[in-house]
Image (cartoon, coloured by chain):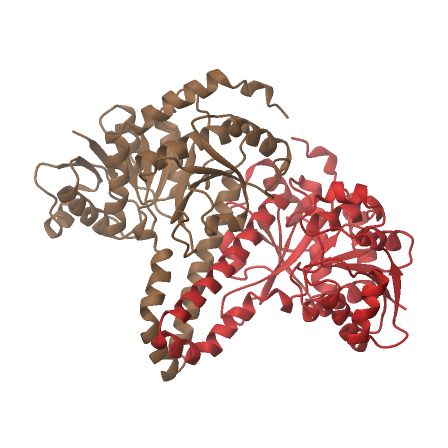
Chain colours: A brown, B red
Amino acid sequence: MTKIAIDAMGGDNAPDEIVKGVAQASHEFDAEYILIGDRIRLEQCMQKYPPRSGTFEIRHTAEFVGMDESPRDALESKPEASISVAAKLLKEDKADAMLSAGNTGAVILAAANNIPMIEGVERSALAVVIPNLVLDKSKPAFTLLLDVGATIHCDVKHLVHFAIMGNIYSKEILGLTTPRLGLLNIGAEDTKGGYTLTQTHKVLKDINELDFIGNIEGNGIIAGEANVVVCDGILGNVLIKLLEGVAEALGELGRYVYNKNIVYKMSLAMLSPGIKKLKKTFDYAEYGGASLMGFRKLCVKAHGKSNAKAIKNAIRIAVMSAQSNMCDKISQSVAEINRKIPFSKFVK
Amino acid sequence: MTKIAIDAMGGDNAPDEIVKGVAQASHEFDAEYILIGDRIRLEQCMQKYPPRSGTFEIRHTAEFVGMDESPRDALESKPEASISVAAKLLKEDKADAMLSAGNTGAVILAAANNIPMIEGVERSALAVVIPNLVLDKSKPAFTLLLDVGATIHCDVKHLVHFAIMGNIYSKEILGLTTPRLGLLNIGAEDTKGGYTLTQTHKVLKDINELDFIGNIEGNGIIAGEANVVVCDGILGNVLIKLLEGVAEALGELGRYVYNKNIVYKMSLAMLSPGIKKLKKTFDYAEYGGASLMGFRKLCVKAHGKSNAKAIKNAIRIAVMSAQSNMCDKISQSVAEINRKIPFSKFVK
C-alpha cells in the first residue's frame, strides 16, 4: 500500500486544515497516511475530521519549524522537527512520498539532509504550475515552471536534468502525452542568454525524448506557449513571487472598487461570473502545491496558506507520484542522458 | 542649446508618430532636435505636424534597422542606419542625448559601438519604470528596475554601478530626494542569493550616498517597496516581459467579457472609471520609455509601439538628462566608489 508521510504541523492553518485535507483524501485515494506532529492536537483534529479508518497512523513529535524561522537554525536546534521526521521516513523506506505546507526552506533542507538524490542528479528543483491567462483553447491551460527556488544558479547539466524531471512529471502527474518544453531566456534566438543557456539549448535540441520548442520569454509563460519551462532557481523564484504580487494587488484593487459606491457594487455583482473565472486562474488551492524533485522520492510542498482542499489536491500528487513510480522513471531517463551527453565539457 | 538626436525611422509607427512627438516636444521643451531618417518622408510628416521653427534639422539617411532584424547583422550591413547615425552624433559631441523607438538590441549595440562608456563603468544597463499596483499612497507609485536586458549576467561591480546609476537617475529625472534602493533577490535575508548577490548586498549597505533597504523579492516590486531595484539583465528582462504578458492577457479577458452579453457590457460601462485606472497603470505611454545608462550620454529607448505622446515623454527624459548633467554626476559618483571599494577581490 502506498504510504504518504504528512508533516501535520507545517503551514499557517496546521494542524486543523492538514488533518481535514488528509481526511478528505483518505476517502478518495487508495493510500495510507502517517501524520507527524503533536499526538494530542492531531487526535483532537481527527475527532472533528475523521479519516477513513485503517488508513492512517500518528507519529508523535513535539517539535516543528515555524513559518518564519531560519530553516538551518531551526532544523539544527530541533532534530525531531515534524518535517525532518517526515523526510527520515522516506529515507528509511517507511513512506513513498511526503507532503508539507510548512516553511519552504526547511522542506528543501530537510529533504537534502535526509533523502538520497536520484543517482546522477546533483541538484533538486522545485516545480510549480502556473495557469496561463489566455483564452485560446488550443494553448496549454498551464505551464509547469522549474526551478523556482531550490537551486539558485544552474549549469547545463542541472537545467537538462530539470527538463527531464519536468517532462516526466507532466506525463505522470499532469496527464500530458508529449509536453512542449521551453527554456526561459532573454530572447527567442538560439544564441541568446550567455554560455550556459546557449549550451543548454543545444543539448535539449538533441534529446529525442523531449519535445523542445526552444527559448521562451517572460510573456510566453502567460501566453501558454509551453507545458514545461526550465530556468535557474532565482529566475523562477522572482517570477512566481511577482505573479503572486500581481494577483494580490488585483484582489486589492477589486475590493477598493467594490467599496467605492453602489454603482460599482452592482456592476461587480453582475460581473461576478467573469471575475470568479479570473480569480480561479490565480487560486493556488486548485493546483495542489509545488513539487520538489531530484530526490528518490517526491516531496510535495503545499502553499503555506493551504486549506483542506489544497492539501487534498497536494496529496493527490504525492499518491500519483508513488503509484506511477515517477522517480524511478526520472532515474532511468537521467542515467541514459548522462551516458549520452559529455556534460563535463561544459565548463565556463 | 541642448541637442537631442532622434532616430526618426525606429518603431512600429515611424516616422509619423515620431515626428508628431518631436513637434509636440518642440513646443514644450527648451531644446533642439536632429531628426535622422529619410528626408522626403520626414518632410512630408513635418507638413502634417510642424515642429516649432528653428528647433530642428534633418540628417538624411536612407538606411534603418527593422524591428525584427538581427541587430548585429543589420548594423554591419547598414553602416548608415539611422540608429548608428544618432549614436555617432553623440560620440562626436554634436548631440547631448538620443532617442529611438526602434529595435532594442540595435539601440544597445549602436550605443556600444559608438558612444564611449563612463570611465570606470564596464557594463551598460537598461532601466524601465514599473508602476506599482498598490493603493497605499505612502508607497512609491513606481519602481525603476535595472538592468532589463543590456547585461545578461552581472558581477558585484556591475550591480553596484547600476545602483549608482539608478539612484542618480531617480533624483535627476524622477524627482526623488532619497530614493529607496533594493536588490532583487530570492529572499529577504542578507545571506540569500549566492556569492555575487550576498557580496553586492554587503557593498551596497556600506555606501553612504545610497538609501539601501536590502533585498527585494518579486512581489516587493509590485508592492512598491523600493524606488530603485537592481538585478541581472536576464532577471529584469524575463520579469518585464512577464508583466507585459499579464497586462495583455488582462486586456484580452476584458474584451472577452465585454463581448459576452449585454449585462456584462452594461456592467463594464459602469465600471469603466475603475478599469481606466487599472489600464493607465499598465500604459507605457505615460512613462516615456526605457533609459540606457552607462554611456557618457543618455540613450532613451521608447517602446516600439510608441505613439506621439510616448515619444514626447521620452524626449522629456532625454532633455532632462542633458540639462541636469546626469551622466557627469554618475561619472563622479562611480569614480568615488571605484576608489573606495576593492572590487577586484570579488572574484568567484
Say how many tags the image has: 0
Q: Relative to the observer, which residue lies in front, A127 or A167?
A: A167
Q: Position of residue A346 (x, y in %)?
A: 59, 23
Q: Quadrant of residue A192?
A: top right
Q: Relative to the observer, which residue lies in front, B263 or B324?
A: B263
Q: Could one spot residue B187 in this view of the protein? A: no
Q: Residue at x 38, y 52 (%)?
A: A137
Q: Residue at x 56, y 32 (%)?
A: A201
B314 with respect to B116 (left or right):
left
Residue B237, placed above or below residue B96: above
Q: Position of residue A153 (x, y in %)?
A: 54, 35
Q: Position of residue A303 (x, y in %)?
A: 34, 48
Identity of the residue furthest to the left in this view: A53
B261 with respect to B336 (left or right):
left
Q: Residue at x 67, y 41 (%)?
A: B156
Q: Could one spot residue B265 in this view of the protein? A: yes
Identity of the residue furthest to the bottom in this view: A262
Residue B301, placed above or below residue B263: above
Q: Position of residue B99 (x, y in %)?
A: 77, 60
Q: Relative to the observer, which residue lies in front, A345 or A153?
A: A345
Q: Relative to the observer, which residue lies in front, A296 or A36?
A: A296
Quadrant, the N terminus of chain B: bottom right
Q: Quadrant of residue B139?
A: bottom right
B69 with respect to B52 (left or right):
left
Quadrant, the C terminus of chain B: top right
Q: Residue at x 64, y 26 (%)?
A: A348
